[in-house]
Image (spheres, coloured by chain):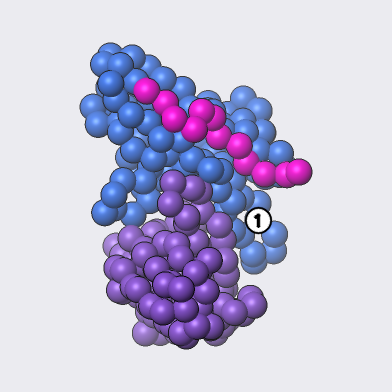
Chain colours: A blue, B purple
Amino acid sequence: DGGITQSPKYLFRKEGQNVTLSCEQNLNHDAMYWYRQDPGQGLRLIYYSQIVNDFQKGDIAEGYSVSREKKESFPLTVTSAQKNPTAFYLCASSIRSGTQETQYFGPGTRLLVL
Amino acid sequence: KQEVTQIPAALSVPEGENLVLNCSFTDSAIYNLQWFRQDPGKGLTSLLLIQSSQREQTSGRLNASLDKSSGRSTLYIAASQPGDSATYLCAVTRAGNNRKLIWGLGTSLAVNP
């Protein structure tokens, strides 16, 4: 059963704490993405990776970090430098097939600050 | 700068009605346009993808059109059902090597039994 999994479903962060959101895919996709979704705003790209061991900043990378050591995994760390981390975080992956390319999304992680 | 706008922001219709959701974009230099569905508290599901050279795509009761020159796309839902209730998001992929998606805010659809 192929797909993208994100864990945990809910995550609570204390002040000054770093937390890591997990994203795993078994679709054999090369590219992976992290988005943040806030009420009243469109999805905003945090980081993306087009290949293993390489990643680029998106539009709102400050306060976040990622790694891409394996094709299947793209964890996102929300650092203490991110002052407003409460949001719904979505991970996605994609593969380019000719002229068709669509992103497949995980179920999301909701991050709340205690 | 590419901007994507979706109108209306919210829509409530009785079951069985045909309806149209609108998406507009400011820069016609796109690679493709996609429509996604998002249920509350869930991830996104891709519904239809239209390449920049295409005019429309169909899947079941869904039909999406693209008019690149006018910067518009519509998602037509025929014979709406309560199970269609969700938020529908439109996104365009910028042309070029950096194929980032630019997202609209979505249309929240409620289909009432």
Expressed as whole percent of the image width and height from the top left, the position of residue A76 reads 47, 29
SS of the residue at dot 1? Answer: loop
B36 above or below A65?
Answer: below
Q: Chain of mark 1?
A: A
As rendered, which of A98 and B9 lies closer to the eye?
Answer: B9
Quarter of the figure with residue B61: bottom right
On screen, residue A48 versus residue B26, left or right, reads right
> In the image as oriented, which residue stretches furthest toward the right?
A1
As rendered, which of B10 and A26 lies closer to the eye?
Answer: B10
Expressed as whole percent of the image width and height from the top left, the position of residue A93 reads 59, 46
Quarter of the figure with residue B74: bottom left
Q: Label 1 sits on what residue type? A: Arg
Going 66% across and 28% down the picture, which residue do you hit? A70
B54 above or below A78?
Answer: below
Residue where numbered disc 1 is placed: A96
Q: Which residues fall within the magenta stretch? A: A1-12
Q: In the rendered view of the protein, which quadrant contains the C terminus of chain A?
A: top left
Going 42% across and 72% down the picture, which residue do you hit? B112
Q: Is residue A4 magenta?
A: yes
On screen, residue B35 versus residue A5, left or right, reads left
